[in-house]
């Protein structure tokens, strides 16, 4: 169990999808009316993800691999009774949410869109990124564009020459998460977001610092769960598969 800004957060990594499902269902002793479960997924792969280009607010569709990832996500969630599914207003997020195949109502919320990256959108940096814009943990680059991007990305009021500052982005995502919490007091919902969007969703829900949020690197096929209620601290799970065993 770890402490995040004075709050105690229970974390767990589960090795098999069926165990993940059992853990998230809460078991027979937990009353559903007392618990809110928020599943957080990232959209499937796009061609720009594959090429290592910064996407930001550019509206790029899924590629074939991304569509398959979305179908696989649906398989992982098929035993979960969802009350609602939320995507951003961008195609890669909406397509992923649609391909999951849930019978729950799907709502697109533009406030969940990825951070707009201004002059950097479409650029390829001199090292890998999450595709949405968040930098990897690689060593600093000698490339001038990459150095400028890394420096400016975390400046609170820098809108990146026509993009969106991190303060404005955090405020927008914070408003979106508050809206969802107001709509859903219990039950289970799914948010299909973006690399940086999901950082800010977790920041808002778990009261993380900017540094902690920036350290979250979510791949296109990963799935998290945040569970609230039951008279205990928020719990965070991450589905661990063969593809991300390195995270253990």
Image (cartoon, helix red, strand yellow):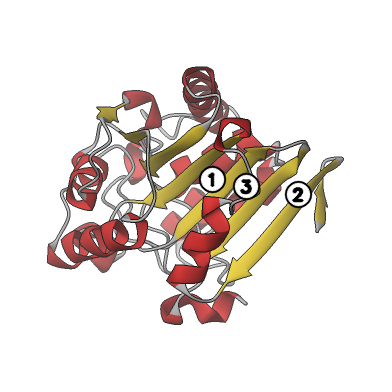
* Residue appearing at x 17%, y 60% in the figure: 67
Decide: few, some or many residues near mark 1? Use Cα within 10 Å; few <14, some 14-19, many ≥20.
Answer: many
The reply to whether dot 1 and dot 2 touch (C-beta < 8 Å) is no
- What residue is shown with label 3? 213
* Residue appearing at x 51%, y 27% in the figure: 177
Residue 141 coordinates in the image, percent (x, y): 52, 68
**Can residue 215 be spotted in the picture?**
no
- Left or right of residue 81: residue 26: right
Closer to the N terminus: mark 1 or mark 3?
Answer: 1
Taking depth in this image into account, of 218 and 39 the one nearest to the observer is 39
Closer to the N terminus: mark 1 or mark 2?
Answer: 2
Residue 217 coordinates in the image, percent (x, y): 52, 59
Taking depth in this image into account, of 116 and 46 the one nearest to the observer is 46
**Can residue 118 be spotted in the picture?**
yes
Taking depth in this image into account, of 132 and 233 the one nearest to the observer is 233
* Residue 65 against residue 192 in the figure, above or below: below
Helix, strand or loop at label 1? It is helix
- What residue is shown with label 1? 199
- What residue is shown with label 2? 9
Q: Quadrant of the C terminus?
A: bottom right
* Residue appearing at x 50%, y 58% in the figure: 135
Helix, strand or loop at label 2? It is strand
Question: Quarter-wise, where is residue 94 in the image?
Answer: top left
Q: Nearer the viewer, mark 3 or mark 2?
A: 2
Q: What is the spatial separation of the Cα atoms under label 1 and label 3, in whole angstroms?
A: 5 Å
The reply to whether dot 1 and dot 3 touch (C-beta < 8 Å) is yes
Taking depth in this image into account, of 47 and 43 the one nearest to the observer is 43
Question: Quarter-wise, where is residue 226 in the image?
Answer: top right
Q: Nearer the viewer, mark 1 or mark 2?
A: 2
Q: Quadrant of the N terminus?
A: bottom right
* Residue 141 against residue 166 in the figure, above or below: below
Residue 185 coordinates in the image, percent (x, y): 55, 24
């Amino acid at each position: 169990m770890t402490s995040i800004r004075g709050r105690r957060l229970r974390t767990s990594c589960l090795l098999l999808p069926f165990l993940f499902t059992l853990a998230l269902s809460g078991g027979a002793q937990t009353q559903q009316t007392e618990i809110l479960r928020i599943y957080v997924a990232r959209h499937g792969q796009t061609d720009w993800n594959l090429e290592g280009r910064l996407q930001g607010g550019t509206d790029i569709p899924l590629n074939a691999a991304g569509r398959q990832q979305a179908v696989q996500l649906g398989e992982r969630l098929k035993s979960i009774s969802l009350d609602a599914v939320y995507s951003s207003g961008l195609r890669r997020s909406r397509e992923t949410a649609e391909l999951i195949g849930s019978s729950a109502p799907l709502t697109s919320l533009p406030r969940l869109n990825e951070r707009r990256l201004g002059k950097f959108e479409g650029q390829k940096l001199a090292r890998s990124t999450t595709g949405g814009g968040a930098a990897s943990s690689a060593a600093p680059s000698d490339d001038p564009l990459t150095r400028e991007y890394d420096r400016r990305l975390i400046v609170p009021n820098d809108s990146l020459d026509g993009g969106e500052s991190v303060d404005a982005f955090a405020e927008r995502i914070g408003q979106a998460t508050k809206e969802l919490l107001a709509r859903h007091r219990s039950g289970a919902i799914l948010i299909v977001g973006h690399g940086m969007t999901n950082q800010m969703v977790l920041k808002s829900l778990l009261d993380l610092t900017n540094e902690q949020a920036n350290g979250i690197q979510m791949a296109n096929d990963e799935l998290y769960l945040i569970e609230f209620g039951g008279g205990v601290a928020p719990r965070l799970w991450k589905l661990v598969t063969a593809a991300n065993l390195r995270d253990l």
